[in-house]
Image (cartoon, rainbow, N blue to C red):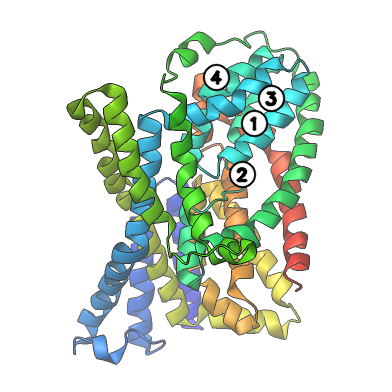
């Protein structure tokens, strides 16, 4: 009981510190260390495999955490860093702009504002598969789609409802959450994306769009006409990069490669080759193809090399933002497990007659609230995902069910958070309050959450 009480106190402390915007990896790491140390003193839980023990228990505490860093940094961490590097490089060479321009151009020919809204929503959701960064996708859509939406007759806040929802589902093989979840479950990323994540997203997306089409006109009528609809449009359009149209294939190419090499695709179509390729390797290869494009386009090896540097800068930046957060979340999860908190919660839920559905729903709700308070879907997901295999084993369910569920709800949570970086950035560009923008995504996101969870239960036959 003492361990559970301590775990509750530390969890509340972590929540308060995160709400106050303190450095998330540091807070989770410290909280995890406290719980692990307390568990060792109480003699509960397993600290480290005996074959890796140092022979001195205080040293074993740090050795167990060091091994987490070593494992994640060399494996999943490096993969996420390479994905982030490629995504940033696509942004710096304006390849993502080229892709968005192709998809946005048909919208200019439409005259119905809400039809433009609906098509823009669908297109940006599809494009988000290739741009895994929430802030990056929102800013890209702000430059490309926002002017079209405004000139179609939509208000700034209605246009922002599309922009702020671009990564509502957090789907795609390049998503850090997806890669972390697949790493924990030892699942193929393509299989996870196609068989588990995509059906849920595609089903829920329809209801979210319908909610948007009902809610946004209501808010426009209630709030009155927007007299500054063309605010800063000329400045935004001036920032769009001019690159050859062929650049548009670069953001899509890694996904095409891993899909073409996936057994799901090769066996279905009877393709002869058997090639193993993960998303990080595909992006790494495509990085050099993009670099070759840049040399040809700029006609200068030196100029192309200056931009190529951004690939490695982004890798370093994502290490401090994401990889450290993953390890810190695992340390915290290990602390909770060593105190016996998770076992007690699962046992209590089972004794109270609460089955897998109730416990998954509770975890989803906590994850969504956490993501809203933190303004980060990654932070919320990484904090809870490490506990999923243990909880799923206790409930005798496939851990992928729980992983998909909390992944989606982490993305839902950040979509309605006024402190989400993407919402803050695009709201500032449009000249509105981030709270106003978050309000426009609130009801459609709640509708999505209410639809997604029952569908997950039905789809996985729980």
Residue 329 at x, y percent in the picture: 41, 64
Q: Which residue is mark 2?
A: 168
Structural distance between the alpha carbons of marks 2 and 4: 20 Å
User: Which disc is residue 430 wearing?
Assistant: 4
Q: Are marks 2 and 3 in contact (CB under 8 Å)?
A: no
Q: Secondary structure at mark 4?
A: helix
**Residue placed under numbered mark 3 in the picture:** 158
Front one among 102 and 68: 102
Question: Nearer the viewer's eye, disc 2 or disc 4?
Answer: 2
The residue under the point 75% across, 51% down is 203
Q: Is residue 360 left or right of residue 306?
A: right
The reply, left or right, for residue 226 in relation to residue 143 is: right
Distance between mark 4 and mark 1 Cα atoms? 13 Å
Q: Position of residue 290 (x, y in %)?
A: 34, 37
Q: Earlier in the sequence, mark 4 or mark 3?
A: 3
- Image position of 439 with respect to 167: above or below: above
Look at 65% across and 54% down and name the residue there: 198
Give the CA separation, mark 1 to mark 3: 7 Å
Q: Position of residue 81 (x, y in %)?
A: 34, 52
> Which mark is drawn over residue 444?
none
Callout 2: few (<14), some (14-19), or many (20+) C-alpha neighbours within 10 Å?
many
Image marks 2 and 1: residues in contact by CB distance under 8 Å: no
Residue beneath the point at 55% across and 45% down = 129
Please give the residue where the numbered disc 1 appears in the rendered image.
162
**Residue 244 seen from this side:** yes
Which element type, helix, strand or loop, lies under badge 3?
helix
């Amino acid at each position: 009981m003492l361990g559970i009480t301590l775990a509750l106190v530390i969890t509340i402390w972590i929540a308060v510190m995160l709400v106050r915007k303190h450095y998330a990896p540091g807070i989770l790491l410290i909280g995890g260390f406290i719980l692990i140390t307390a568990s060792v003193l109480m003699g509960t839980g397993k600290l480290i495999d005996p074959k890796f023990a140092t022979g001195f228990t205080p040293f074993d505490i740090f050795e167990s955490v060091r091994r987490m860093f070593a494992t994640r940094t060399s494996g999943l961490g490096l993969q996420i860093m390479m994905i982030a590097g490629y995504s940033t490089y696509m942004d710096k060479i304006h390849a993502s702009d080229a892709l968005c321009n192709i998809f946005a151009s048909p919208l200019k020919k439409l005259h119905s504002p809400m039809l433009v809204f609906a098509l823009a929503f669908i297109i940006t959701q599809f494009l988000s598969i290739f741009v895994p960064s929430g802030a990056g996708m929102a800013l890209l859509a702000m430059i490309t789609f926002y002017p079209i939406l405004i000139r179609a007759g939509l208000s700034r806040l209605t246009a922002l409802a599309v922009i702020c929802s671009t990564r509502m589902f957090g789907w795609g093989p390049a998503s850090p959450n997806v890669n972390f979840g697949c790493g924990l479950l030892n699942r193929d990323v393509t299989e996870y994306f196609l068989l588990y994540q995509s059906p849920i997203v595609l089903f829920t997306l329809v209801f979210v769009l319908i909610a948007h089409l009902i809610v946004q006109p209501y808010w426009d009528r209630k709030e009155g006409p927007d007299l500054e609809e063309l605010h800063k449009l000329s400045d935004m359009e001036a920032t769009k990069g001019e690159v050859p149209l062929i650049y548009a294939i670069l953001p899509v190419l890694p996904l095409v490669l891993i899909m073409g090499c996936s057994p799901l695709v090769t066996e279905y179509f009877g393709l002869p080759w058997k090639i193993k390729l993960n998303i990080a390797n595909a992006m790494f290869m495509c990085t050099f193809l993009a670099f070759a494009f840049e040399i040809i386009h700029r006609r200068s090896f030196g100029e192309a090399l200056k931009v190529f540097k951004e690939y490695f800068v982004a890798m370093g930046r994502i290490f401090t933002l994401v990889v450290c957060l993953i390890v810190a979340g695992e340390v915290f999860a290990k602390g909770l497990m060593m105190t016996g908190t998770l076992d007690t919660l699962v046992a209590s839920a089972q004794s109270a007659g609460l089955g897998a559905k109730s416990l998954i729903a509770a975890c989803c709700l906590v994850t969504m609230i956490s993501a809203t308070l933190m303004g980060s879907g990654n932070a919320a997901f990484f904090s809870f995902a490490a506990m999923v295999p243990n909880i799923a084993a206790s409930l005798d369910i496939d851990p992928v069910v729980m992983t998909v569920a909390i992944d989606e709800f982490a993305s839902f949570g950040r979509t309605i958070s006024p402190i989400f970086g993407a919402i803050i950035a695009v709201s500032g560009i449009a000249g509105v309050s981030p709270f106003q923008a978050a309000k426009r995504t609130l009801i459609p996101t709640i509708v999505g959450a209410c639809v997604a969870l029952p569908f997950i239960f039905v789809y996985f036959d729980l």
